[in-house]
Amino acid sequence: MEHTSAKASDKTIITVLGKDTVGIIAKVCTYLSEHNINVLDISQTIVQGYFNMMMIVEMNESEVSFSKCSEELDKIGADIGVSIKCQKEEIFEMMHRI
């Protein structure tokens, strides 16, 4: 099976920010895996006890809509005490154009 690269409209930026606790990455990645959302890139840091993660994911194989994914990740974040936000890549790029 040949893999084609994702169009910008298929990509979503997910950010996670909050107090560092065990299991943040596991909970987010479990949700993504269960909904067939592919992680293309991930970066995470912990600064003075605060967790910060940015992921670029591809949603073109997922059965869940962007808005439902965003809503469900927001709820997961609230349950574990972090902020999880989703943003479509093309919107992110437009907002950060110079």
Image: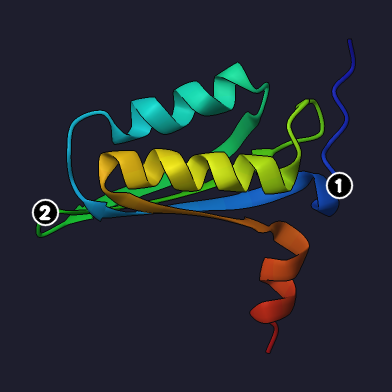
In the rendered image, the quadrant that contains the C terminus is bottom right
The picture quadrant where one finds residue 96 is: bottom right
The picture quadrant where one finds residue 60 is: top right
Q: Nearer the viewer, residue 65 or 2?
A: 65
Q: Nearer the viewer, mark 1 or mark 2?
A: 2
Above or below for 72 versus 89:
above
Q: Nearer the viewer, residue 82 or 40?
A: 82
Residue type at mark 2 is Gly
Who comes first in sequence, dot 1 or dot 2? 1
Residue depicted at x 44% and y 33%? 28
Residue depicted at x 56% and y 28%? 32
- Give neighbour class at mark 1: few <14, some 14-19, many 20+ (Cα, 10 Å): few
Residue depicted at x 28% and y 39%? 80
Residue type at mark 1 is Lys
Q: Is residue 60 left or right of residue 88?
A: right
Give the residue pinned by disc 2: 49
Percent x, y of residue 95: 67, 79
Percent x, y of residue 44: 35, 47
Give the residue pinned by disc 1: 7
Q: Is residue 26 left or right of residue 42?
A: left
Q: Secondary structure at mark 1?
A: loop
Percent x, y of residue 3: 85, 23
Percent x, y of residue 5: 83, 37
Please name the colour scheme applied to the rendered image. Answer: rainbow
